[in-house]
Amino acid sequence: MRRRQLGRSDLQVAPLCLGGNVFGWTADEDASFTVLDAYMDAGGNFVDSADVYARWAPGNRGGESEEVLGRWMASRGNRSSVIVATKLGSEMGPGASGLSPQYMTQAVEASLRRLQTDYVDLYQAHRDDASTPLDETLAAFDDLIKQGKVRVIGASNYSAARLTEAVATSERLGLARFESLQPPYSLVQRDEYEPDLEPYCREHAIGVIPYSSLASGFLSGKYRAGQPLPTTPRAGGIQQKYMNERGFAVLAELDRAATAHSATPAQVALAWLMARPGLTAPIASATTVPQLREIMGAIDLTLDPATIAALDTAQAA
C-alpha cells in the first residue's frame, strides 16, 4: 500500500485513516481489537481518536477510545508501527476544555496515560478556542514537540480565516505550524471545505484528513426513500440532514458508479475523496471486519474522470 505524506511532516500514512470514534461506544473492546488487527493486516497504519471519544455515550466519561487503542497497542507490541492521531480541546468536564497552555499540559499527559505511550504522532486541536490567543496555543504545541511528547500538530474544525491566522502566527514566531486539517467533508457535505479551505490547504501543503467521509453512514446506501431507517443511534440525525432530494440524487449517482465499477456505494464515496487533489486520507470507521474490508477496498478503486465528474455534479442536479 502506497503511503501519503501528511503535510510537510515526515509522517507517511495510509490513504485511509481508521476512525476510533466507535471504540468503547458502538464497538466494544473485543470488536475494536478485531477491527484494528484487520486494518493493520490490510496494510493500514493511521488511527484517529480524541480524548472526548466516547463521552457522549451513557455511562462513559470520555477517554474510552484512547484507552482501547492503548490497550490494543500494548497487547500487540506494535506502537512503532501505528501513526496515532488524537485530539484535545472538547469539553471533558467542568473547566476541562479549550486550548490554554495550562490545560494543554494536563490534557496531553492524560492522553498519553490512556494511550500507554510517551508520544503522540499527530496531536490536533479538536476545535478553535477563541478565548485563548493563538500565539499562546501554538507556543504550547511547539513546547510539546520540543519535549518529544508530540511529533506533528494539526487542527480540526477550523475556519479558513482562523487556519490562515494560525499558520501566519507560527511563521511569524518561528513555531511549529499545523500540518493537517480535519474538516467535515463528503459528497453531501462540501460547502465547509471546498470554497476556502481547500485552496488554502493545497497552496500551503497542509494535509487534509476529513471526517464524516460517509456522512455518518448515509453514503453507505443503507438509507433509502420509503424504507425503514437503520436502528442506529445516528439514524434520526441522518434522516433530518441528508434524506432529501439532494441527498438522494447523490445516492443515485453512487449506485450507478458502484454498478459500473463492481463496487459498493461506500467504496465509491471514499474513492471519490481519495482522488481529490490535496486530500491525504479520509477517515472512516468500522465496527466489524466485513465493514473494515469494505472501506479498505476503496483504496484499490480507481474512478475514471467521467465518474468523478458525474459525482461532482450530482448534488446540484
Image: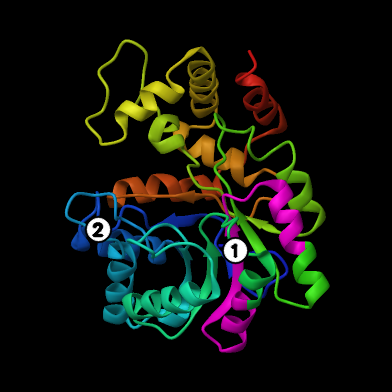
Q: Residue furthest left?
A: 59
Q: In the figure, 32 relative to 197: above or below?
A: below
Residue at 56% over, 89% down: 147
Query: In the image, is 108 to the left or to the right of 256?
Result: left
**Label number found at residue 132:** 1
Q: Please tell me whether residue 283 belongs to the stretch shown in magenta.
A: no
| Residue 4: image location, x then y, percent | 64, 62
Give the residue type at disc 1: Thr
10 Å neighbourhood of mark 1: few (<14), some, or many (≥20)? few
The residue tagged with tag 2: helix, strand or loop? loop
Asked whether 269 or 187 is in front, the reply is 187
| 1 or 2: mark nearer the eye | 1
The residue tagged with tag 1: helix, strand or loop? loop
Give the residue type at disc 2: Gly
| Position of the C terminus by quadrant | top right
**Label number found at residue 24:** 2
Q: Which of disc 2 and disc 1 is earlier in sequence?
A: 2
